[in-house]
Image (cartoon, rainbow, N blue to C red):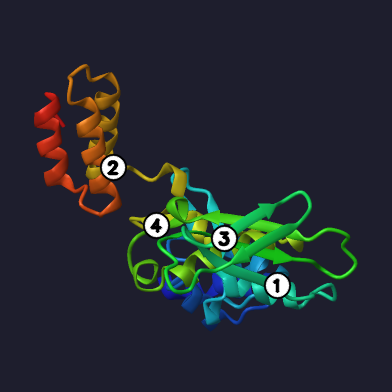
Amino acid sequence: MAENDIVQLNAEKISNLTGFAPAAIALIKNTVAKGTTDTELAFFLTAAKSVNLNPLNKEIWCYKDSKGNVLVFAGRDGFLKRAQESSLWNGMTSFEVCENDFFEMDVPKGIVEHKPKFKDRGKIIGAYCIIKPKGCEFPTVEWAEFSVYNKGYNVWKSDPASMIKKVAETHGLKKAFGITIIQSEYDFDVKDNVVIPIGELPKSELEIAKKKIIDALDAYKGADKNKLQGECVIAQNEGKFDLLFASLMANKIGIEL
């Protein structure tokens, strides 16, 4: 039996199990489910069918983690589609919050007070989402911290407000409607076709240098300690705390990076 015949036979078995046509299964395996075995692919397609999301429209996809486990993912739109299919859907509210906005949030009571200062909003610090399904006494309120989720590239760089709102919305939708099986794409990053939780991403050279300098300054005994700490704060606020600044500061306090 030729290799293509074996692939076709496996695809037919998966087709019988999941309802996807063999040709579609082959396409999915080469696009949104790369590197999966036939068993893993069958699991992924079964999960996609159970939440009514279509891999061919890139509504749902999968990756493996560092231990080889298959994780199923969707973006905000996938979670939103799933929630809107519920008879409890009642809309949602979300907005990005900047450092100069007036903002107070009482999560247990589900109360958010937000007045954007549109003339001078400052830097984005996060976003919130409020969802109150029909029949629920209290709303689900989610907060997403920008510094935690900001990946600093692609759309995160060109439209950070939209991206941090998507994080808050995804978390809110998942919690308010009890959406299981699928993971939020915003909680992970992809390296060499393997997903890594954002909290476990390796730190950049600059982040490592900053921590070394901050720790060293805490223990620094020089008379110019306050002055050097002030220089670091100013450089950070002005976006000038780069590797060159870190190297110069390391020389001043006598440490190696």
**Visible residue check, residue 157:** yes
Q: Look at 48% across and 73% down and name the residue there.
A: 118
Residue 147 in the image: above or below residue 219? below
* Separation of marks 1 and 3 at Cα, in angstroms: 21 Å
For the residue marked with disc 4, what is the amino acid?
Val
Q: Look at 11% across and 24% down and name the residue there.
A: 254
The numbered mark, 4 or 3, whose residue comes first in the sequence reads 3
* Separation of marks 4 and 3 at Cα, in angstroms: 35 Å
State the residue position of label 4. Answer: 190
Observer-nearest residue: 134 or 55?
134
Observer-nearest residue: 142 or 245?
245
Check residue 92 in the rendering and tell me which mark sits there, or answer none: 1
State the residue position of label 2. Answer: 233
The numbered mark, 4 or 2, whose residue comes first in the sequence reads 4
Instruction: Residue 250 in the image: state x and y as whole percent.
Output: 14, 31
Residue 204 in the image: above or below residue 126? above
State the residue position of label 3. Answer: 102
